Image (spheres, rainbow, N blue to C red):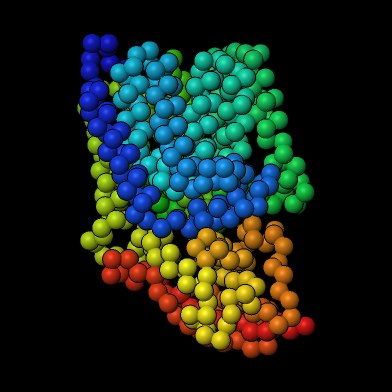
């Protein structure tokens, strides 16, 4: 699977433009036709309390959402990453036709498409990873430091690009002096995140290390199998194996890009043997892979492009017009049925004697539900047991004066924890309401009223 000769042809320009157009239309349809993804609502909560770090990730996604909003962040990062892939491929291969093929390939990678619909830390990471990789390829060290620093401000695994570059320098037996400028600038950008962690008992670093590499007795080959299945789905059923082929057998002069594809896949593949991870974690690997596959034989280009597009269209059509029924349809429940939480903006409809001004806060048993309530009802929220530790635990508790009420909202029947209920005079409820989509019941929410905070 070496690079073709200049006379050979791959995806035509018309096909590339068509792929880009269909991918953009699919993204717009998902943006307009779905509710806010629950993790995105969590990052939106961060954007209301800007800081240099958060429990789960560095701060750049929150800064983007604060500046551009949810849709603006998705559009900027999604379109910007496609443009950056085009420029990287243009310089690597030396011709615009291959650059268009690489951009078209990336536009239909399912992981990239999702990051361009619902902003997560992956959204800015993919953009700045590509820019940093391009700058390293061109040996533009200052730009590489700026882009690399922004990548580190997006997500901690951005450090893997530095690992790929160091491997390339060892192989070349050459470390350019300009690389020290890159490292200095990137370190300066990332330093405030380190200081924030130091002020918070290193919670961000500790969480990511335990979350990504913590040993789970249930892990092993079963979770590694889940990792492989996740890559076939989010990377693409053809692009994922081609990324491995490119990393092992790609052109010698592409060694930096080959390592940028291999290092994330190998690292998170190893991590999957220790703990159950998320399929999107190695998404950045497919950026370099698209550039590499754009120079492979036309049959592989077409197979990677159309298989990726098929995944995007199948999943997108299911999210917009579901036909199939699954016992636990996580993709549908994560993207629909949340907007009904606007009911909590006027809680007197659930508890007639309650006045909206007397509700000091809304509590929930997990950060996802608390964030969706905050987004749709625009109410102060907080998590309570059995919620896992999250950014909510680093923020101050809501001020509830004596006599004020709070609400407890859950899904699945989790009742108000005793530690919370004991602070109030009485507990009323639950009252149920439902989150439906196209005739399907996706969520059943229960709401309790915790009445009259004790002195």
Relative to 295, is 238 above or below?
below
Name which residue lies at 73% across and 76% down: 401
88 vs 415, left or right, is left
Relative to 265, is 271 above or below?
below
Q: Position of residue 371 (x, y in %)?
A: 54, 61
Name which residue lies at 49% across and 22% down: 134
Q: State the quadrant of the N terminus.
A: top left
87 vs 398, left or right, is left
Q: Nearer the viewer, residue 53 or 377?
A: 377
Name which residue lies at 57% across and 70% down: 364
Relative to 447, is 153 above or below?
above
Res. 283 image quadrant: top left
Q: Position of residue 82 (x, y in %)?
A: 40, 31
**In this view of the protein, can residue 122 be seen by the observer?**
no
60 vs 262, left or right, is right
435 vs 5, left or right, is right
Name which residue lies at 53% across and 31% down: 128
Q: Nearer the viewer, residue 420 or 268?
A: 420
Q: Nearer the viewer, residue 103 or 386?
A: 103
**In this view of the protein, can residue 378 be seen by the observer?**
yes
Q: State the quadrant of the C terminus.
A: bottom right
Q: Position of residue 75 (x, y in %)?
A: 43, 40
Q: Position of residue 451 (x, y in %)?
A: 64, 84
**Count of all numbered marks drawn on residues in the image:** 0
């Amino acid at each position: 699977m070496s690079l073709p000769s200049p006379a050979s042809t791959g995806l035509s320009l018309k096909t590339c433009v068509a792929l880009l157009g269909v991918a953009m239309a699919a993204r717009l349809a998902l943006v307009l036709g779905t509710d806010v993804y629950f993790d995105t609502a969590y990052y939106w909560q961060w954007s209301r309390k800007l800081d240099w770090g958060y429990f789960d990730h560095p701060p750049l996604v929150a800064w983007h959402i604060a500046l551009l909003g949810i849709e603006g962040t998705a559009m900027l990062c999604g379109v910007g990453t496609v443009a950056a892939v085009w420029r990287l491929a243009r310089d690597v291969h030396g011709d615009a036709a291959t650059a268009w093929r690489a951009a078209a390939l990336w536009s239909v990678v399912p992981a990239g498409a999702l990051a361009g619909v619902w902003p997560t830390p992956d959204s800015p990471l993919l953009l700045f990873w590509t820019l940093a990789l391009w700058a390293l390829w061109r040996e533009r060290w200052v730009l590489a430091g700026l882009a690399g620093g922004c990548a580190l401000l997006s997500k901690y695994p951005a450090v893997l690009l530095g690992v790929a570059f160091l491997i390339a320098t060892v192989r070349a037996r050459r470390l350019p002096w300009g690389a020290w400028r890159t490292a200095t600038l990137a370190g300066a950008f990332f330093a405030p995140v380190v200081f924030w962690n130091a002020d918070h008992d290193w919670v961000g670093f500790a969480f990511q290390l335990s979350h990504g590499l913590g040993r789970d007795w249930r892990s092993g080959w079963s979770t590694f199998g889940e990792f492989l299945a996740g890559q076939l789905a989010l990377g693409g059923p053809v692009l994922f194996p081609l990324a491995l082929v490119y990393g092992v057998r790609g052109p010698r002069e592409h060694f930096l890009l080959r390592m940028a594809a291999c290092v994330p896949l190998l690292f998170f593949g190893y991590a999957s043997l220790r703990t159950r991870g998320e399929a999107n974690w190695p998404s950045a690997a497919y950026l370099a892979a698209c550039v590499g596959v754009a120079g492979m034989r036309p049959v592989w280009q077409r197979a990677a492009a159309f298989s990726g597009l098929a995944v995007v269209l199948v999943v997108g059509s299911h999210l917009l017009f579901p036909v199939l029924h699954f016992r636990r349809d996580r993709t549908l429940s994560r993207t629909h049925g949340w907007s009904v939480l606007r009911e909590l903006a006027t809680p007197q409809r659930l508890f007639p004697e309650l006045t909206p001004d007397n509700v000091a806060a809304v509590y929930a048993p997990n950060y996802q539900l608390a964030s969706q309530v905050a987004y749709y009802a625009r109410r102060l929220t907080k998590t309570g047991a059995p919620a896992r530790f999250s950014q909510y635990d680093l923020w101050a508790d809501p001020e509830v004066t004596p006599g004020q009420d709070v609400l407890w909202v859950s899904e699945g029947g989790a009742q108000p924890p005793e530690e919370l209920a004991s602070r109030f005079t009485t507990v009323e409820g639950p009252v149920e309401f439902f989150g439906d989509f196209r005739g399907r019941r996706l969520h059943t929410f229960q709401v309790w009223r915790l009445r009259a905070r004790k002195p």
